[in-house]
Image (spheres, rainbow, N blue to C red):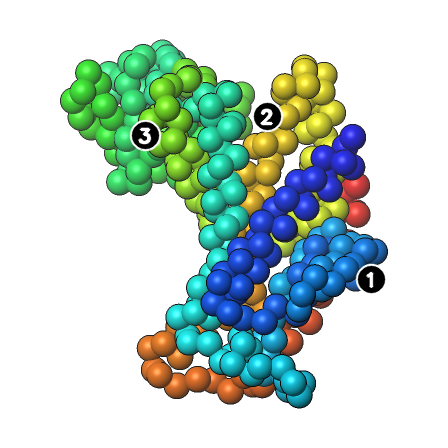
Amino acid sequence: MKIVWSLLIFGLVVIIHELGHFLIAKKNGVYVTQFSVGMGPRLLHFQKGETEYCLKLLPIGGSCMMLGEDGEEIAEGIDKSRSFQAKSVWARIAVIAAGPIFNFILAFVLAIILIGCMGFDKPQVGETVKGYPMAEAGMKEGDVILKLNGENIKVYREISLFMQLNGDKTIDVTYLRDGEKHTATITPKYSKEAGYYLMGMSSVGRVKGNGFEVVKYSVYEVRWWIKYVVKSLQMLFTGKVKASELSGPVGIVSTISQTYEESSKISTFAVVMSMLNFSILLSANLGVMNLLPLPALDGGRLVFLFWEAITKKRVPPEKEGMVHFVGIVLLMALMVFVMINDIKRL
């Protein structure tokens, strides 16, 4: 079942991403030559209309291949006005941006299910610990944290992440009590027992709410995972996270397996909720990563398209295609590096 769950999660996230490109391409009259899930040799394929649909061996990606996408020659007899490059710049931007946007939509839909069933982690004080800065500042059970050093806090996990990055600094806390805003300045206290800085507070845990709160906190849930991915990238580039700690498909499958084993000891419901949570993380992660302004990624393509929209000058498709080709080579090299790291950790 561990492998089945891994394939289901990977498949869902990839299919939705490529479906975003596919549907908006079709909507704009672009000729889609191939829609595939997976990479490498084809396992299954069939032709429907102008598009070939494929299931490939390696479940680590997918593609939505469009006519003339990288400036290649168009065969005789095919309507050139239906090529990707023949469409307006805004139509092309919509097609490329649709993949990551669909991932965020998927994350939101799954978050509604998760939060509807499990509740949300409101950034509310469960209790304060005597001798620690929260209690000394006069904060108490029921206070809702709104901001830490001006940074908006929407879910309790953001407090933990903030402390991980800023625990050794003085913190200005904005909180809500009985409908009124208050502020306090605290200096976190280092705990030898815990091994890190603490404010001295606990969470109230997950709480359930009405339909409006479920939708609102589903937005916050997606926001949290996007924020988590962005902060993780910042830590990578600033050296707080080592490149050797990066994880790829092998590492993700391993984590899914471990999560499955732990949650299966509790109940089937716990398994489903854990897998939902992992799917939200992976979908938001794929959306963010694909928007990075790097060659071969959707973000890299959008850089060229927005340049064209602003300057009214198009970079020759064959030159742009070469840049993306180099990006693909480098991306493949990175995937091999990450896979080796994953195997070493296993």
Task: Please tell me whether residue 70 is drawn above or below residue 123 in the rendered image.
Answer: below
Task: Please tell me whether residue 226 is drawn above or below residue 111 in the rendered image.
Answer: below
Residue 338 position, x and y percent, is 70, 54
Disc nearest the viewer among 1 and 2: 1
Residue 81 position, x and y percent, is 51, 81
Residue contact between numbered discs 1 and 3, judged by CB atoms under 8 Å? no
Look at mark 1 in the image and give the residue it sits on. 41
Of the numbered discs in the image, which one, if any, rests on residue 187?
3
Three-letter amino acid code at the position of disc 3: Thr
Task: Please tell me whether residue 336 is drawn above or below residue 69 in the rendered image.
Answer: above
Three-letter amino acid code at the position of disc 1: Pro
Three-letter amino acid code at the position of disc 2: Met
Sequence-first tag of 2 and 3 = 3
Helix, strand or loop at mark 3: loop
Q: Residues within 10 Å of mark 2 (few under 14, many from 20)?
A: some
Pick the front one: 285 or 233: 285
Look at mark 2 in the image and give the residue it sits on. 273
Which quadrant of the figure has residue 74? Answer: bottom right
Sequence-first tag of 1 and 3 = 1
Which quadrant of the figure has residue 32? Answer: bottom right
Q: Is residue 329 visible?
A: yes
Disc nearest the viewer among 1 and 3: 1
